[in-house]
Image (tube, rainbow, N blue to C red):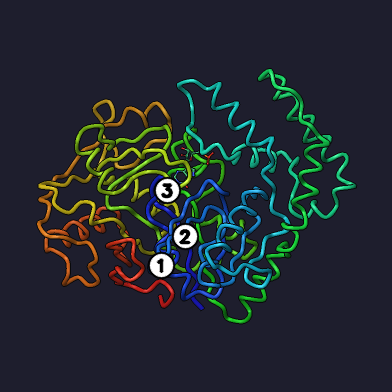
Amino acid sequence: MANVTVIGAQWGDEGKGKIVDWLASRADAVVRFQGGHNAGHTLVVGDQVYKLSLLPSGIVTGTLSIIGNGVVLDPWALKAEVEKLTAQGVEINPDNFALADNCPLILPLHRDLDGLREAAAGTGKIGTTGRGIGPAYEDKVGRRAIRVCDLAHLDTLGSQLDRLCAHHDALRAGFGQPPVDRDALVAELREIAPFVLQFAQVVWKRLQTVRKAGARVLFEGAQGVLLDVDHGTYPFVTSSNTVSGTASAGSGLGPAATGFVLGIVKAYTTRVGSGPFPTELTDATGQKLGERGHEFGTVTGRKRRCGWFDAVLVRQSCAISGVTGIALTKLDVLDGFEKVRICTGYRLRGKVLDYFPSYAGDQAEVEPIYEEMDGWHGTTAGARSWADLPAQAIKYIQRVQELIETPVALVSTSPERDDTILVRDPFLD
Ligand code: IMP
């Protein structure tokens, strides 16, 4: 049995949605294992466009979709997304959607705190999605979180709520905000509880059953390795581990189940929010990449920062996440460029580095060392075989593969599901 774990190998927005959708149509279960509704996956199927933030991509094809314990769950965002998709004709019920009963909740007080901190941070803003993700993870590791299973016991939450509210009241007071309205919070939870609880299950057990039956499991990562709380551009990161290893801890299926690790890699680089970005282009070329790539955030609508492909960062991500093969996306955005550049190393105070350093000061200071290649005439958009690609585009892919020391498994050439060149099928590997 081959399972597949999909992760972003840059700063998110690599085009995971389409690849996951393509794989989900052949999987028996799709599992989200980290992040929350800060993610944004766009699926284009025929003339329908589905925008998902929280639900696993398998939901659109009716595949068993699971939200694992590693996700932080905003119950109101879940309800809104389920209602939106249902209105688009997608069937969602406890048979095809399971939610881990040990999943921690994102509450309105987490959203408040996210906003208050960002507003107070001035130039030190992380540029979060404002969804309360960081504060919710803090409460999880601080052992104060309210979890999905607690929704069935709201009358006896007493001391747990006390601890949570005492913690937040102290923080809110520091921001000159009134304390948490505890009664209103409990009333809101009471109202949403039946909706959430209908999907709540012992997910690790359901996954065991699925696995014993020989099912193919697809683990769907959100964000990207460079936003990982340990391995990313700290502190400009999200608050979860986005690396492939989290697929296991965030779902309750052992590490051997991770299977083929497919790293999604955009043919150039983008980033939303603040933080270091060595190959960022603030000139007309960056503008052109952004316009041609429609680089606006799915969740927040923010303009993404754009730059050349950074092979150092992607090589690092692939190593840290044990990537078996990559899916290269959005190659067509580079169509028609006279010259294209790839970052192959950094210069830092006279020294050459072949990795991205940990210290934030060094991360901000490194200068990219570029290799320049001829661009290609003609289009790669819609290509479905190597023969459809201009020779120079193939050279670019080969050079990328060489520099990141990881083979290309797929090339995606448009948002359409079938516009894909398959080199190596992750499920059959
Ligand atoms: P948070 O996850 O909302 O706390 O945001 C922390 C950082 O991660 C910010 O720079 C966000 O822009 C970034 N981020 C969070 N989710 C995504 C995503 O799905 N795609 C790209 N960037 C993201």
The disc placed on residue 12 is 3
Judge whether 220 appears above or below 243 on screen. below
At label 2, counting other C-alpha atoms closer than 10 Å, the crowd grade (few under 14, some 14-19, many 20 or more) is some
The relative height of residue 312 versus residue 166 in the rendered view (above or below) is below
User: Does label 2 or label 3 sit earlier along the sequence?
Assistant: 3
Which kind of residue does numbered mark 3 sit on?
A: Gly
Ligand 1 contact, mark 1 (Cβ < 8 Å): no
Q: Amino acid at mark 2?
A: Tyr
Asked if labels 2 and 1 touch by Cβ distance under 8 angstroms, the answer is yes
**Numbered badge on residue 50:** 2
Which label's residue is closer to the chain start, 3 or 1? 3
Tell me the CA gap for discs 1 and 2. Answer: 8 Å
Instruction: Give x and y (percent) for residue 365.
Output: 32, 27
The quarter holding residue 356 reads top left
The quarter of the displayed image where residue 252 is located: bottom right
Q: Which mark is residue 45?
A: 1
The answer to which image quadrant residue 399 occupies is: bottom left
The one of 300 and 218 positioned closer to us in this rendering: 300
Looking at the rendered structure, the secondary structure element under dot 3 is loop
